[in-house]
Image (cartoon, grey):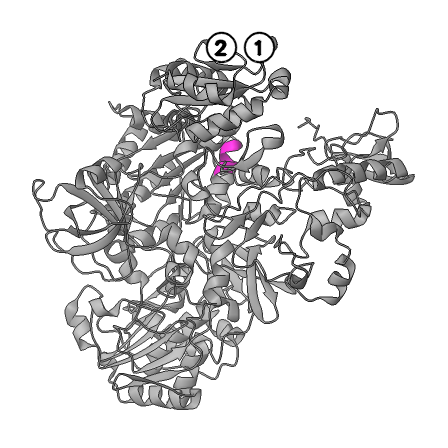
Amino acid sequence: MGKRGAKKKDISNILSGFRDDEGNLIPILQKIQKKLGFISEDSVRQTARYLRISENQIFGVASFYSQFRFNEPGRNSIKVCLGTACHVQGGQILSEAVERDLGILPGQTTEDMRYDYEQVACLGCCALAPVIQINDDIYSRMTVIRLKETMDKYE
Amino acid sequence: MPQMSKRKGKLTIFIDNKKYSCETGSTILEAAEQSGVYIPTLCAHTEMSPFGGCRMCIVEVEGMRGFPTSCTTPVADGMKIMTHTAQIQEERKEILQLILSEHTSSCLICDERLECKESTATIRKVGVTTGCRYCPSDQQCELQDVVEYLGVEEIGYPVYYRNLKVEKNDPFYDRDYNLCILCGRCIRMCQEVRTANILAFKQRGRNTVIGPAFERTHLEAGCEFCGACVSTCPTGALSEKARKWEGKADYAVTTTCAFCGTGCRLDLQVKGKKVIGSLPAGDSHVSDRQLCVKGRFCVTELVNSHKRIKKPFTFREGHRFNTNWKEAIGIAAGILSSCKPEEFGMIVSSDCTNEDLYIAQKFTRSVMGSHNINTEARIFYGQTFNAYLDLFELSTPISDIAKSDLVLSVGIDTRFSRSVIGVELRKAISAGARLVTINSEEHNLVNIAVRWIRPEAGGESAVLKALCTAFTGKSTNDKDIAYVSGLLRQANKITILVGSQYPTFKGGAEILGRIKDLALKTGAGITPLPPQCNFVGTLLAGVYSEILPGGLNASNKKSLSAVRKGSGAPVPAFKNPWQFGSSAAWKKIKVLYLVGDFPLERYCSPDHLIYQNIFGPRDTLKADLVLPARAFSEIDGTIISGEGRIQKIKKAADSPGEAKADWNILCMIARKMGKKGFGFSSAAGIRKELSTFVPGVARSSKNLVALPIEGRLLLGRTKKIARADKKRYPFILNAYSMEHLYHGNEISETVEGAAVLFGSGRLEVNPVDARKLRIKNGDEVIVTSPLHSWRWTVKISEDQLPETLRVTLAPGEVAEMNPQRVKIRRK
């Protein structure tokens, strides 16, 4: 499990750039994500106080959009493609292998902050399916056996 | 939500070829409901904005494309609407099947459902024997009604079971989102009506779930546990824990909640002769179909508790002997008739009805010939009692909140206490009012207030004084004071809400005095919100040694003779008041009669104790005789709420065993002792006699009773406060009195869920301090001040400032005035 809200960062300089109008929620969230890399529990709390709306409403809005994440990103991020071609070539098996290996679900970060893990729809290189991406590196024709070796390369 | 014009006017529409007239601006659904035409719906609700989510209410409108949803389409003149053509019904069936494919629905389409409904008296629509244990919303399922109306008998889609874990971690209600149809009613209830904003749709598409932010429980998210979402759920997704398998009520009885002085009206749900639930009543001037956690969930568990006593019993040599009423009354009369007037004392609960209170004082004054009567409210308010009474001179009703353009809330948190006031506040705010809150503690109004002034506990009086000075036009350096005094000057109508924790503060009486000063200066009205159910009633029924019925002053000889005349019974001359602060006064008491629980151990140990309550006495109380009393759901009577409204209490259910009404027991003893003037056979008779002192109490009146009250208490001198130095006692403790009582008993001792929410003895500690002290949630700690030592359980709270502690005292626990210096160590 990722450490949600483990670090507390002051976001008041982000907030002070906006009027306290709830219509500004999404731009505020985008700036927070840009600065912290994710939407922390504490930043939601501070935003709620500033806009005078509840944390629950903010989370409701933010969780609707896939662009926002609520777990602190790890040092490395692994993306498993589940697009049509990858799906046919066994992408699902790869994603299950990643889940088993890291012990986390999509959208989460490992306890040691080494990996965060996401499922994506298409990485744009369907001819090489099944594909995974670790940080900026693409690995093609991936198998469960090679997956382990590949993942071990990243600390 | 489409913006609909709200211009008044009638127009003509045709529903299913019949002509109807309806109001401009209403939706097709509303117009159909008013005309008595049924259109099935799952997500629409009269109290909420149209949602158009379930698509059940589709209709055909001539000249409009497709099938518009009737809940979101406004009517137009001459509109021709068809509500159940074959095509619409077919569409609805299809949509309903889609909904059902994501809803555990075996009970809706089961082959045996008809036999089951007719022949089983089981708690569920489908018998336990057939193994169907899915849903607790029996015979109260709106989804079921729609399924039956459309005659859906099978589901033509693959069933998608989401396998979500049933959420059982919160008190009072469980949530099984596998049964949820995402109609959004609970969310709109929480956001629009309660404006508590705990619930929201999370994620999207087929992953949509309902709940608070992150993976928080409702408790962590700040839920008020008002239960409004549970009441409005059309399925069994939200269900009340205590009522889960009770089924449908036979009928409802409208009465008044006795758990605080707000005076909300309840519909007690009765099945057989038992109260199985309580829902908000529609006829209220106060609560507008809303309740707090106590009224909604605590009533049933409290009045049905296994701890209720059913028979009178005595203690002889430490052993308990059950007895009958005849013998018990004889024993009581024996103890009381050999007691001298100055040796008698009676303490009566301020949650009793006016009738009970009046008889209690009449018993003390004319049977015992003594003025030694008091309530536990005397201890609660202590040295601030008279200052609190002064506030009632400027009392305005709760409904004034809605009319105000500025509300000043002093020391109010509406999460668990008086949460309907919170709803009123938020409604006023959305209508344009502004809220300023003055509170030394973190509280739930912070998010809706334009300004939160946070003095240290006891610093309120300086803030209020500064506001007073700034209001008259003097300039100030304090930004907050300048801003708020500006608001005060601009406002046309100001209401000040006053919390009830100032008796525990240093200079509490001064704070209350300053509130009154500010109100006088700004022309504001004050709404004191006493936590005692019938605090105003105790004053008007005269259950203090210095105060006679009608709120008259006992040291006034004319008042005494008026009471003699009005009650037709002797009343002794008034000599000394029974001051709770004086230990000499307590030493004189040899026989004590308690109506409701009281922390007696702190004050005296009388030779004889008669204990009358709905629960038995604590082990440490040595009672001679214990008499079982009825709870408020089992008696008729009246109470007077904090705003001065006379509210009826109505009998809804039978009392357990042989319990009797408080007034009845006292009258029986008086008659046994051969006294006249106690021949009442019903509460109405007592009310008639009381109405000579409190006009209007006998009539069901929509008007408020006349406050102020003439009588005042003699309070004696304030105790000196022990000094403690900062080095030895590094923490600041604020200890508050327990407000959630019924007849002196802590509600949380009987109601399990209440203990989670507002039990006493939980010490709130800042997480940084907790780390330094190496204490965890749930640890026991010993807190010491120069004079006292307590043992409490730790609750780590982000809301607590560093080096400050906060706790709610159990009744009977003693502390110094807030803020006090303490040290803390692990046990």
Q: Answer with left or right where residue B117 lies relative to residue B819.
A: right
Position of B606 with respect to B91 (left or right) is: left
Dot 1 amino acid type:
Leu
Q: Is the magenta stretch mostly helix, strand or loop?
A: helix
Would you say B709 lies left or right of B149 here? left
Do callouts 1 and 2 point to residues on the same chain?
yes
Residue A138 has which mark? 2
Where does the image place residue B548, in percent across and percent down from the top left? 35, 69
Q: Which residue is drawn at 59% across and 22% down?
A: A90
Q: Is residue B260 visible?
A: no
Query: Compared with residue B251, is residue B52 higher up or lower down, i.e. above or below?
Result: above
Would you name the residue on which mark 1 appears?
A: A128
Total tally of numbered discs in the picture: 2
Q: How far apart are marks 1 and 2 (CA)?
A: 10 Å
x and y percent of residue B381 in the render? 29, 56
Callouts 1 and 2 close, C-beta under 8 Å: yes
**Residue B429 painted magenta:** yes
